[in-house]
Image (cartoon, rainbow, N blue to C red):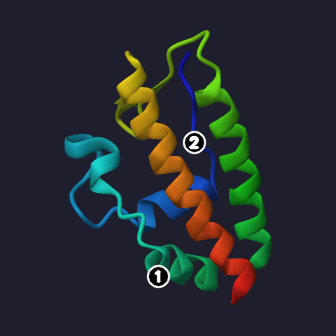
Amino acid sequence: MSVEVPSPLSQCIIFCEVVCVRGCCGIDAVSTDPALIGAWCRRVGPDAVLEARLQLAELIEVVEDRSQRVTSTFLNHRTYDDAGRRQLLDFLAAFEAGLATADEA
């Protein structure tokens, strides 16, 4: 199953793409540093953060469904095996934690 990453979640990921570029390194190109995610949250405001969190929750639900492999061109990642799925879920969980810090600010 191919999944899209809608905006504003995609914009947050692009904002955090500071290690390399997704086309080269996939999700490893994106920092999950809560301070960086928090900077994006402050920049876009609470409505966009809430929408990104809802989009992220939906994405996590799709990735957790082990009945299908997940492919994302945007993230340059595929869940061909359990290790690939776990890597993506860990990445998404780190983003979830970073976006949750916006509530604390």
User: How many marks are shown on the rendered structure?
Assistant: 2
Residue 79 in view (yes/no): no
Dot 1: element: helix
Disc 2 marks a residue whose amino acid type is Val
Disc 1 marks a residue whose amino acid type is Ala
Q: Is residue 104 shown above or below 96?
A: below
In which image quadrant can residue 3 be found? top right
Label 1 sits on residue: 35
The quadrant of the image that shows the C terminus is: bottom right
Residue 49 point in image, percent of width and height: 71, 69
Label 2 sits on residue: 5
26 relative to 56 in the view: left or right: left
Looking at the rendered structure, which numbered label has been put on residue 79?
A: none
Residue positioned most to the bottom = 105
Dot 2: element: loop
Mark 2 or mark 1: which comes first in sequence? Answer: 2
In which image quadrant can residue 46 be found? bottom right
Q: Residue at x 51, y 73 (%)?
A: 37
103 relative to 32 in the view: left or right: right
Q: Residue at x 61, y 58 (%)?
A: 96
Q: Residues within 10 Å of mark 2 (few under 14, many from 20)?
A: some
Residue 30 or residue 43, whichever sits in front: 30
Q: Is residue 65 shown above or below 10?
A: above
